[in-house]
Image: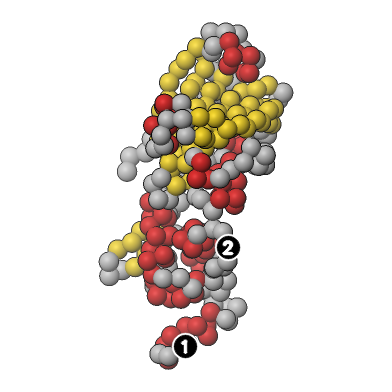
Amino acid sequence: MDSKLKGLRAGMGDPRSPLQGLRLNPRSSLPLHAQAEQSLRELLSRPAHGPGTLLPDEVSLANAMGVSRNTLRAAIARLVSEGKLDRKAGVGTRVLEPKVHSGVGAWQSFSREMESKGVKVETYSVSARTLPAPPEVARRLHVDEGTEVLCLDRIRGWEDQPVVRFRSYLHKRLRLKVDDNFSQPLYELIRSRCGVIADQSEDALSAIAADRRLARALRVRAGAPLLQRTRTVYDTRQQPIEYAVVHYRGDRFELNLTLRHP
């Protein structure tokens, strides 16, 4: 074995090594590229890798994690797309200053986003059932009309008042069951239970008047203004995993969008 590589691997066992603790678990249900992404995020949290610093070279990182360079590059590409890293040929991979997320960008956990604003979210009802995919759901999830999907309904809010109704249609390949624990953040459940990472979403916003069903669920009068948000969520392979229709009470919720010049 090359003496330089021997020295690198010896250094990985040294608790003082900057690459200590990055080795992945090949028996985990989480794909290696997703584990590599988690390890990179943990590495970025260390003081030695603050904004402006360069990450170790790809060979060193791949050996420390025990993965191929292609797997490592997939994880790096994810963080580059988020604006956390910048790659330049002949220079390396540099850590960037963190960006501020807007209210639209922070979509992965409604409860955690609200908690960051000092609002404690409560869940008033959760129900799950399987049903044949309606035409729009089938189109969004890229399945045949009538294919069985899991439909998840959640009513959430705060201060004893319902504020938002989430209806999610989940792709059958996730293999979620109606009796799974949907009290936790949905994308965290999908990640831990299915080994699938929610990577990006396409959202559309519109204003509607509450019909009787929504009015009853959100405790508003029929015809009250609601903000409707439709969302298709994709995994890291650009495959759809969820189509959601979300309704917010106009008198209790405000969606903010911050735009910044690049």
Q: Position of residue 71 (x, y in %)?
A: 41, 65
Nearest the eye: 50 or 165: 165
Q: How many marks?
A: 2
For the point 45% across and 39% down, which residue is it? 233
Q: In whole angstroms, how far apart are the C-alphas of marks 1 and 2? A: 27 Å
Of callouts 1 and 2, the N-terminal one:
1
Three-letter amino acid code of the residue under disc 1? Lys
Q: How is the image coloured?
A: secondary structure
Q: Residue at x 49, y 21 (%)?
A: 227
Name the image quarter holding the N terminus: bottom left
Residue type, mark 2 in image? Ser
User: Is residue 163 toward the left or the right of residue 204 in the image?
Assistant: right
Q: Position of residue 91 (x, y in %)?
A: 31, 68
Residue linked to disc 1: 6
Q: Is 157 displayed left or right of 90 in the figure? A: right
- What residue did someone put label 2 on? 28
In the displayed structure image, the side of residue 220 where residue 43 appears, left or right: left
Above or below residue 98? Residue 201 is: above
Disc 1 element? helix
Q: Residues within 10 Å of mark 1 (few under 14, many from 20)?
A: few
Q: Nearer the viewer, residue 212 or 90?
A: 212
Q: Is residue 1 visible?
A: yes
The label shown at residue 34 is none
Answer above or below: position of 157 versus 58: above
Residue found at the far left of this picture: 89
Depth check: give the residue in front, 225 or 101.
225
SS state under label 2:
loop
The quarter of the displayed image where residue 117 is located:
top right
